[in-house]
Image: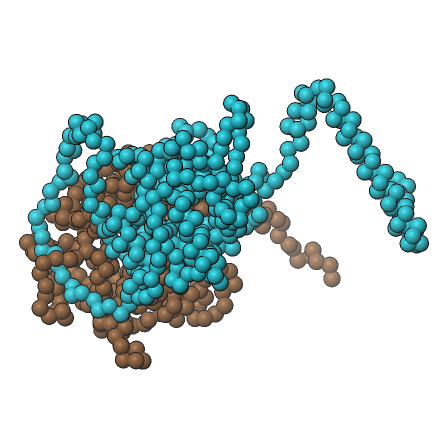
Amino acid sequence: MAPARFQPSSIKNKIKREEVTRKLKKSKNQAKLQKRLDQAKVEANDPAAKKKRISENVPRTLDNTREADPAMLSAAGPSSAQHVEFSNDIASDPFADYFNFTQDPTIPPKVLITTSAKASKGTYEFCDELVGVFPGAEFIRRKKGKGFEMGRIAGWAAGRGYKHLLVVNEDMKKPNAITLVYLPNGPMAYFKLTSIELTKQIYGHARATPHNPELVLNNFSTTLGHNVGRMFQTLFPPLPEFQGRQVVALHNQRDFLFFRRHRYAFRSPEKVALQEIGPRFTLKLRWVKRGLPAVQNFGASPDALEISVGTEELPGPPEETPMPEQDEESEMRPLEPVPVSNPPKDNEYIWRWKPELETTRKTFFL
Amino acid sequence: MPRFLVGDELGNIKSVGYNPASQEESKTTFKILHDGTVTGRTKGIQKLALNAGEKTLLSAAHANGAVSIFSSNEDDQLELLQEWKETRIKSDQSFIGLAASGSGVSHNLAALPSRLCDWRLSHDKQTVEVSLWDTERAFSRPSESSAKGAPVNGSKKRKQSDTLFPGEVWRAKNVPNDFLGLRQPVHNTCLTYLSPSTSTSQQHLLAGTRLGDMRRYDTRAGRRPVAVFKGVGKVGGVKTVEKGFSEHEAFISDNGSNVYAVDLRNGSISYGYKGLSGTAISLAASPTYLASASIDRYIRIHSVVQLPDKVGQHLDKKGTVLERVFMTTIPTAVVWDQEQDIAPVNEDEQGGEDVWEGMKNAEEGDEKA
């Protein structure tokens, strides 16, 4: 059996005991520092050794020990069967219209920003900033009352050509959540909003310009993450104006989405300087529902039951009308009238965060 | 090993089999039976129905109004037998029910069999009471076009709303007015059959409502519901209801991410399944397991626990989610394969008997006094 080490805690005299522990700790720290200095000296002459040490000692974090999730699109490459099926799925989801580029890609999609009923100053200021962030955004004050439910507003906005409805919810005089509804009948997502810093609160902030920004979407790995990323992508015009040198980043880390807006400047072909513009906030996805927001009207009397008598067959799908010449001449085709659908009676959850889903600290959903 | 067939939004048909005895980490086997990805969402599957006769036939109703029948061949792939298109269906209407029986499907009309059909709420917000139709009578006059694959809206109004339509056998009546004397609103969302007797004329029906209630009707016993189970669908009303294989058992899912097993004797929830993150839009029960398809792209296999003999008795074990299988596209319908399990040979018992046979018989003088 090895001899027991001398423990300073066995000294009963407090002054002496503290002296001895202080000395012991100092000598340990000195030894560690000396070791690091020697290592630095060796590495100053031999950069390969430094690389080797760094590549061996990768710290283990929750991000890189994330639990394997079947919903994660693996790095198996774009030709794997899962990717093929997923890209087919994406090609016909509600956001596919944006990626077909049928209209002028520099025209921004219209976004309607509003608040919950009876908002206060903090929320209005935040909405002002949001109007500056999204190029096609408009702010409209929300009225309070029975006919102004979110589902009805979504229906009207869809009829007037808006592509998104963004509702900033307020609690205790501060904005706390964002509901993003994709129109005309797309999914809706609800995010919790925290850590808001407006432009004026950021020290040394840059000035925003009305150029279309570039977009950086980081770290969306699961199918749910992809859908949220695409939803966010459709808020901005497809073609950015590079002359504006503005970039909007939505970075996902551990299911928190960090929104930042920067202006970049190349000091040299390798070095870039960033200056932050605009609001900075954090979002956390709480649920995603299918369809427009539901509007309940329990007291309405039912229509009489009818049977459709039509036996005539509807005409088959219209044949493809050839339009090769028109595409070259005019960039913009007149918009087809958007079919306005009434808000549904109930919504289904595509995904919903529940505490029981977080089985370990290493499970993430985006 | 029960197998479930799943249809999804792109028109694929896949099969998920669950083998409880397998020693591997994942007890499910997953196979793609019919690949429909190239057609996009226009041919997404809305309803699936299986008929297990001499040959297993699977019929699928698609979003563009087409209905196809498949049969499975030897190497487990699905062959398309027949396909036709319901041209009367409009773009915002959807198939609301599909059932398959031995006689197959009639060509003239949408996919409906010679037995009874499901009625359901449609997209255009109509509120209808549960009703029972005799489809033979209804379809005997094709000029009147009672195609029940699509919800109704249209030109002819009935003068009196209470008379039965041609072919309609029975229509339910609303529950009595509430304590304020107001009519209780009718918002039925889903329907299933319980058949306590084999005769087709008496059927018990279970209907779920948007307010979260479940109503049980007996077509012989009158028009009002026999029982109303309140508060079963907790979030947003009842989405689907499916009868379990044991008596008095039904599974429901609501518009939040909940799936519950309900005891039909007293209408209370026996247990619920945890771990779902999206609405389950389709449930399929087999004698031993339950499969659910939910729009968070997972098919889950659940274990089913026998309900206690006495009503309200405490359940020791509750049902759990055994496994989940990820589907890359959103699944829309799931049905059970209807292949009865072969009773597993009980090898332990036989081994035990060998032990006994190998022993010597005790004799009288062996035991010492």
Which x, y percent locates residue A159? 24, 51
Q: Is residue A323 above or below residue B310?
A: above
Q: Is B144 rendered above or below residue B82?
A: below
Q: Quadrant of residue B162?
A: bottom left
Q: Which chain is brown?
A: B
Q: Quadrant of the C terminus of chain B?
A: bottom right
Position of B41 compared to A204: left or right? left
At x 90% / y 50%, what residue is drawn? Answer: A17
**Would residue A324 be found to the left or right of residue A204 on screen?**
left
Residue A207 image offset from top left, x and y in percent = 46, 40
B307 and B215: which is toward the camera: B215
For the rendered model, the colour scheme is by chain
Q: Position of residue A279 (x, y in %)?
A: 48, 46
Q: The N terminus of chain B appears in which quarter of the rendering?
A: top left
Q: Looking at the image, which residue is at 52% across and 42% down? A: A205
The cyan chain is A
On the question of residue B217 being in view, the answer is no
Camera-nearest residue between A245 and B282? A245
- Asked whether residue A236 appears in the rendered view, the answer is yes
> At which x and y percent is residue A283?
48, 49
How many circles with numbers are drawn on the protein? 0
Q: Nearer the viewer, residue A124 or A75?
A: A124
Residue at 14% from the left image edge and 35% from the top image edge: A319
Q: Is residue B151 shown above or below A67?
A: below
Asked if residue B216 is positioned above or below residue B96 in the image, the reply reads below
Q: Residue B299 versus residue B340: which sits nearer the camera?
A: B299
